[in-house]
Image: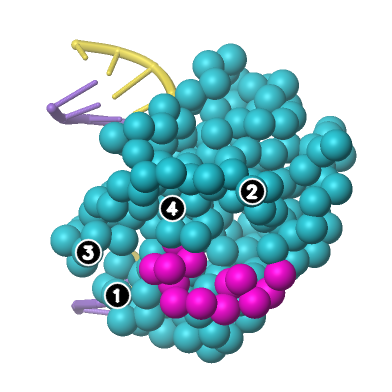
Chain colours: A cyan, B yellow, C purple
Amino acid sequence: MTYLDMRPLPREFYVQPTVEAARNLLGKVLVHRTEEGVIAGRIVETEAYLRDDPACHASRGMTRRNAAMFGEPGRAYVYFTYGAHHCLNAVTSAEGVGEAVLIRAVEPLEGVEIMKRNRGTDELTNLASGPGKLCQAFGLDLRHNGLDLTGGELFIVDDGFDPGEIATRTRVGIRLAADKPWRFYLAGNRFVSRK
DNA sequence: ACATCGATCTACT
DNA sequence: GTAGATCGATGTA
């Protein structure tokens, strides 16, 4: 039994208010089928980015970079930033709105050796504890922008895990709308990017 | 055309 | 704790 055999969350899952989606994605499992093998990790930290939220890439209208955010829910929005890093989002809400959930951290479950190689470290808590690290560990880049998360390559499954207590904090690394409590993580989890 | 800055990470002090 | 990497998007001229 592998996470590959499990059914991806359906499109309807992503058609819900973005803050709820951010909370509901906690505890689910992100799966990437690569040529090297299957990589999977439990989502332990997310952030919501809303349409009328100055910190959201979509808040100033559609550009080539953020176009995927305005596409159908259940697709990936991957962007490149700081000249070095990629970040993975799941498009939520409804098509044309421009909202998404940033997947900030996962607990490595499967394909750990691949992740270690991709990241150049053996330390489990340093493999995917941050959005840039997560994409590097999972081998995600702009080629995956717009990919359908209900398909068979990159998807999210529910394995019945109980996320337990969810902590709510302000988002990391933003200047605008820094007071919004739209960051969520599993309380006490050691794989989050920050406590 | 040029300047600034970013949903980050690493290395170094 | 702070600086530097490094490039695309955006704002100003």
What's the chain of the residue with tag 2? A
What's the chain of the residue with tag 3? A
Can residue A154 be seen here? The reply is yes
SS label for mark 1: loop
Q: What residue did someone put label 1 on? A: A53
**Foreground mark, 4 or 2?**
2
State which tag comes first along the sequence, 4 or 2: 4
Q: What residue did someone put label 4 on? A: A46
Query: Do pointers 3 and 2 mark residues of a single chain?
Result: yes
SS label for mark 4: strand
State which tag comes first along the sequence, 1 or 2: 1
* Image location (x, y in percent) of residue A81: 45, 53
Q: CA distance from mark 3 to mark 2?
A: 29 Å
Query: Do pointers 4 and 1 mark residues of a single chain?
Result: yes
Q: CA distance from mark 4 to mark 1?
A: 16 Å
Identify the residue at horizontal 62%, vertical 64% (top origin). A76
Query: Do pointers 1 and 2 mark residues of a single chain?
Result: yes
For residue A96, above or below residue A18: below
A6 and B12: which is toward the camera = A6
Q: What residue did someone put label 3 on? A: A180
Q: Which residues are magenta?
A: A10-22
Q: Amino acid at mark 3?
A: Lys
Query: Splitting the image into 4 quarters, where does residue A147 fall?
Result: bottom right
Q: Are marks 1 and 3 in contact (CB under 8 Å)?
A: yes
